[in-house]
Image (cartoon, rainbow, N blue to C red):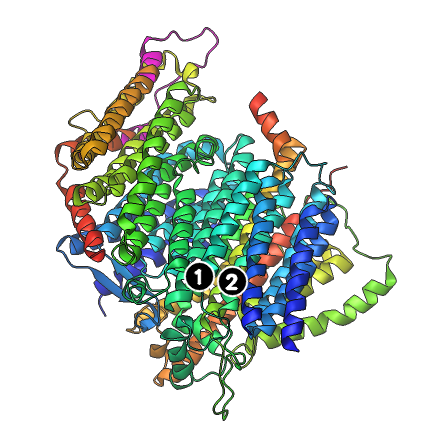
Amino acid sequence: MTILFAVFLLTMLVITAIAIVRTPDLFAAVMLLGIFSLLMAANFFVLDAADVALTEAAVGAGISTVLFLGALALTAARERSSLAPPRLALVVVLITAATVVYATFDKPALGDPNAPVHQHVAPWYLEQTPVLIGIPNVVTAVLGSFRGYDTLGEVFVVFAAAIGVLFVLSGDRPLSAVFRPKDAPSTGGLKHHLIPRIVGKLLIPFILLFGFYVQFHGEYGPGGGFQAGAIIAAAVILYAVLEGEDRALVALPEPVLKGLVAGGALLYTAVGLVCMLLGGNFLEYSVLSADAVFGQQLGIILIEAGVGVAVTGVLLCIFHAFAARDNPA
Amino acid sequence: MQILGLYNYWVFVALLMIGFYAVIAKDNLIKKLIGLSIFQAAVFLLYISMDKVEGGTAPIIQPGAVDQIYSNPLPQVLILTAIVVGISTTALGLAIVVRIKEAYDTIEESEAAAMDREA
Amino acid sequence: MSLAAQLPALQVVVPMLTAPLVAFLRLPNLAWAGTLAASAMAFAMAVSLTLTVLGGVSIDYAMGGWPAPFGIVLAIDAFSALLLLVVTGASTLALLAGKASLDREIAVDRQPLFFAGWLLVLAGLSGIVVTGDAFNIFVFMEISSLATYMLVAGGPDRRALTSVFKYLIMGTIGATFYLIGVGLIYMMTGTLNLADMADRIGAVEDVKPILVAAGFITMGLALKAAVFPLHAWLPNAYTYAPNIVTVFLAACSTKVALYVLLRFDFVVFQGNLAQHDLQFAGFLIPLALLGIVMGSIAAVFERNLKRLLAYSSVAQIGYILLGAGCVSLLGLTSGIVHMFNHALTKGALFLAVACLGMSLARLRVSDIAGVGRQMPWTMAAFVLAGLSLIGVPGTAGFISKWYLILAALEQGTLGLFMVAVIIGSSLLAVVYIWRIVETAYFGEREAGATVCAEAPLPILALTWAAALANLYFGLRPQLPVELATQAARALLGDAL
């Protein structure tokens, strides 16, 4: 039964992808991309990757769609009628595909517990996480502690995106005008649309609550900083859409957002440095407390908080930067 | 299971092709970025297909559960990072496209390139 | 715990930590000072690590205290140390020299964001060079790439935007190819640590996915390193970026991608895949030769000063690959030493161009007619660095080409052809450098052209420092050659 469902999902993925590429209506393409992400998330869930499914749904289907729509509002709604499909591109793509298919011939079967990928490192993580770190979600343990350095890099990638977008979008206007052009009238949001406003406002507290739940529950179930940051940002974006960006900026003003962005990254790095000062290596949480296991848990909670804070700040900064730009006439 | 494994892989190849084609063949800058997203999503599928163990479940070790097979946690960690990297690249790319629209009044690559050549 | 033991981690953490600290400051000069301080500290750490490594010791550091292959381990040897010196040195030099140049091109209120981006490029490149984990390389590669896109987009001309978009697309394709390759290897070996992969690859029976993985990783890194014919993003990105950014990028960014290519290939693939050295040479040497020839020819016909030097960089990357493709001690040494020397040469050349940019708005070769009389010191520095580019004996460039020719001569008949290409391209370099020098000194300044004043002392002095460094390392090349030889030996040793 699951197999049938999985096959169905995979087929829909391909069909959606082809539709996205072929349609000249960019708005339709972006909406289909959202559906594509959701199907991908469902597929991840079928493959037992619960954390990844949550992230793909929140980030891919949620935030990515918002960003694309924000950019679409500022650019064009349709693709110009395309030229004849370039032959060279088709050839390159087919060669690449053939090479990758060639690699299929010897790959291990899906789900085979004796495949090399399930030996060596993975069983060690599964055995040692309860012993060394003491939290149920092994993915969070690997993400936060065993490979915490990668996650630090990831937070800085997100930080780079925020300062990159702010820098690029301040190319032709003063930096102070990137979030809110001076003398811009209040946009008012969806003031005249009663139903979305009422239903939306009912939803916002629940979304925020769910976001905080995902943040703090990341060690016990699917969740963690990235997903939580995306969900909380989505709640604020919903508020901005309903009431107008200026009201959202009153709720979370610009200095606060910038503080979140810098603060989250600094918190993560600071935890690592404190470990160094206490005698361990960088990000060695065991030294944070007399009980090594508790130290690990403390370290993971702190860095996940840093991640959640940074991601919320970044996504909101990027959203406001796009939303504040004037629509071309 | 065997068929599912192979099908997963073929879908990965198909999505890779579709996304890659969109990036290199399409003229519209936003379509290129969309294609890039699909291209990256295909790679996520490759990694996650690797993590499934037959009869396994998500790697969340409930206390007291014995003899439970778990799927592999490592590819999931890698893809969590890769998803975030992908969205960051998309965000920066979109900001650049907005500036290009304001500077060139077009988001078709060939038109912008023609304007560049005249300069 | 001693400071020395923590240096590998601090090398990356110090610039990374400074970035959020400077990003939202109000005073741009404070942001610049903070960035300079972090960069100088990173340089000092790189020097210290180099001194440790010169003794033949390689340094290992377990992030989070978890041993390999369960955690991420940093591994620093001579090759890493050489590149750390290049990256941190170029960053510090460009920052010291370039505040005035930057003020002309980037609005003051945006500069704190710019400097935060600069620090992220520094942290990203340092992170790639010190790590021993394949996926960690991907993460830091994307940190440095995203920040680089941002820096390049700061250029005042609107063509910076289209150039950086192309760079973004090609760079992300390259990174994704690399990710596919790493995924396929992980699928067959179950580990992400480079040294561990090398151990476990030998045990794999079905090599097809590994071969395909090698192909993807090579293609992806070739895109990032601007190997011909995947170099299309480089000329425009270098041309339209702010002048100081070009100094930093031309010195480092492609070299680090080549570092990853060589490290991955020699540690993981060579010696574990049958006939790989022949495949490697057979694939890279023709591309390297083509890159040298096409890059040099394009430079000869190019009218824009920065783009001319950018095409010359494509040719220089060809030299590095030609040396590496020989898969011999001399070959690898010549390639690696050229990473160091080319950083010096192009760094000095682009600094001289930045000096010119202080007075001139457009930088076509025709725009600098007669400038030699108005900016004598700048042009003299340019000439000196140009001699190093050509490879005149006594300059750093000569050392690289000498070793390269020696390595080529070991290759028999093909080697003679390679020597012919090297000498021919050096003659082409004479042509395009002479064209610039002739226009600058013997050209007539047009009636309405801008009157150029000599560049301000800070940037001029540092341009001269870079130019003189070319002379110094041409006459006393012991340090880079020693590091490069050790690095080559380590790479070949891993391949055994």
Residue A18's label in the rendered image is none
Split into 4 quadrants, where in the image is the C terminus of chain A?
Answer: top right
Element assignment for label 2 = helix
Split into 4 quadrants, where in the image is the N terminus of chain A?
Answer: bottom right
Q: Residue at x 63, y 56 (%)?
A: A64
C100 left or right, relative to C323: right
Residue linked to disc 2: B46
Let me know if residue C218 appears in the view. yes
Element assignment for label 1 = helix
| Number of numbered discs on residues | 2
A96 left or right, relative to A64: left
Q: Residue at x 44, y 80 (%)?
A: A297
Quarter of the figure with residue C366 = top left
Residue linked to disc 1: C183
Let me know if residue A257 appears in the view. no
Q: Position of residue C11 (x, y in %)?
A: 30, 56
User: Label 2 neighbourhood size at 10 Å, few (<14), some (14-19), many (20+)?
Assistant: many
**Residue C458 belongs to magenta span:** yes
Q: Position of residue B11 (x, y in %)?
A: 59, 60
Q: Which residues are magenta?
A: C436-462
| Tag 2 subunit | B
Q: Residue at x 70, y 52 (%)?
A: A19
State the separation of the CA atoms marked 2 and 1. 8 Å
Q: Amino acid at mark 2?
A: Leu
Q: Residue at x 45, y 44 (%)?
A: C148
